[in-house]
Image (cartoon, helix red, strand yellow):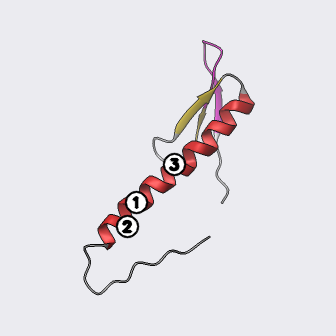
Amino acid sequence: MIFHVTLEHAEDGWVVAECPALPGCVSQGEDEKVALENIREAITAWLWAEDQKAVSSLSHAEGRVPLVVAV
């Protein structure tokens, strides 16, 4: 998947990375390279957490068979 991110240089010298498509998905790093590595990890964690919320709601639904689909 492809996500757009923003980079902002903070006053303390760190770089803040944010993924606007995923509310609250923010990370930082000492430079742009590290900030981008960290936001990739944050995006993965954000998507995993949302999937876990969906899985827990499926387990209570009668007649539904939860499946895993790779994208």
Q: How many marks?
A: 3
Expressed as whole percent of the image width and height from the top left, the position of residue 8 reads 64, 27
Task: Tell me if mark 3 has few (under 14), some (14-19) or many (20+) residues whose alpha carbon lies within 10 angstroms of its own.
Answer: few
Mark positioned earlier in the residue sequence (3 or 2): 3
Residue plotted at (56% across, 33% down): 27
Residue 16 placement, left or right of 68? right
- Magenta stretch containing residue 4, yes or no? no
Asked whether 13 or 70 is in front, the reply is 70
**Residue named by callout 1:** 52
Q: Nearer the viewer, residue 31 or 4?
A: 31
The image shows residue 26 at horizontal and vertical percentages of 53, 36
Which quadrant of the figure has residue 63? bottom left
The residue identified by callout 3 is 45
The residue sitting at 65% across, 48% down in the picture is: 4
Q: Quadrant of residue 5?
A: top right
Going by the numbered disc 1, the residue's amino acid type is Gln
- Tell me if residue 40 comes above or below residue 2 in the rendering: above
Dot 2: within a 10 Å radius of its alpha carbon, few (fewer than 14), some, or many (20 or more) residues? Answer: some
Type of residue at label 3?
Ala
Q: Are marks 3 and 2 in contact (CB under 8 Å)?
A: no
Q: Are marks 2 and 1 in contact (CB under 8 Å)?
A: yes
The earlier-in-sequence mark between 3 and 1 is 3
Tell me if I can see residue 12 in this picture. Answer: yes
Q: Secondary structure at mark 2?
A: helix
Q: Which residues are magenta?
A: 6-16
**Image disc number at residue 55:** 2
Left or right of 46 in this view: 66: left
CB under 8 Å between discs 3 and 1: no
Please report the residue visible at 30 percent of the width from the left and 67 percent of the height from the top: 57
Q: Position of residue 66 (x, y in %)?
A: 40, 78
Local secondary structure at mark 3: helix
